[in-house]
Image (cartoon, rainbow, N blue to C red):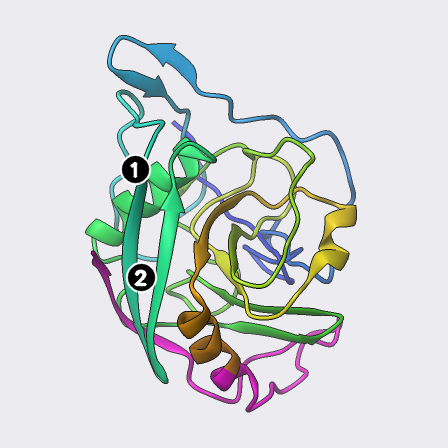
Amino acid sequence: MIIGVAVLLTSCGQIPVSPPAPSSPGTPSVESSAPNATPVAAAEGDVCEYSLSGTAARPVEPPPSTGVPTSGTIGYLLSMTNGAVTITLDRAMAPCTVNSFVSLAEQGYFDDTKCHRLADSGIFILQCGDPSGTGKGGPGYEFANETDGTETYTEGVVAMANGGPGSNGSQFFLVWADSSSLDKKRHFTIFGHMDKASRDVVASMAEEGQDGSNRDGTGRPNNPCEISSVTRL
């Protein structure tokens, strides 16, 4: 089993990075060929590999690794500081990633957590998914990227943050305005989308700015950006 994290912006889940954190957009990690989390066909669904890695930021069981659904969508409502954010996850696009998110959400892993990183120049993302709030926390396991080189990080995208190939964990980011400059790397797994109303909620929180505490110009949001609960629709 695997367990890891992504830094899409600079931290364990950064858009591109931190411990080897997930990579955060805006500060992508050194490029290398990312192993693809291509599911292996099984009798009932597919097989995903989740490798144990580090200590979980919050006690949680790894997701099931067999019988993973590879078609259909599933919706979740994130109750956040400024309102409801609805995300639709695509199992066909990233079955192992969606499987992990669903498992963590059902275990309450994301409840009462704060999004720890905001990028509001060049790329426009809000990075969440670390209960420790440090950008270095993960679920105690990691898994491979599910990318094919055609990813584009347009407004409304929901993607994984990571610290390099195969280091996906629990951190993810919400793209509240076009961030296609990240297309140069394309190593952040896209596994869902927000609708416009939800994007507007995220943008309203982002409008309050951030403290610039990270070396790449990103920082902790001035708005609490708290996720009080994640509920399946």
Residue 233 visible in the shown view: yes
- At label 2, the amino acid type is Phe
Q: Element under label 1? A: loop
- At label 1, the amino acid type is Pro
Viewport quadrant of the N terminus: top left
The residue labelled by disc 2 is: 110
Front of the two marks 2 and 1 = 2
Q: Element under label 2? A: loop
Q: Residues within 10 Å of mark 1 (few under 14, many from 20)?
A: some
Asked which quadrant contains residue 86, the reply is bottom left
Residue at the far top in the pictured view: 43
The residue labelled by disc 1 is: 62
Q: Of residues 189 and 8, which is closer to you in this image?
A: 189
Task: Give me the C-alpha separation between circle 2 and circle 1.
Answer: 14 Å
Q: Which mark is residue 194?
A: none
Magenta segment, which residues? Answer: 204-233
On screen, 68 above or below 110? Answer: above
Residue 10 located within the stretch drawn in magenta:
no
Asked which quadrant contains residue 232, the reply is bottom left
Whether residue 130 sits left or right of residue 112 in the image: it is right
Whether residue 115 sits left or right of residue 31 in the image: it is left
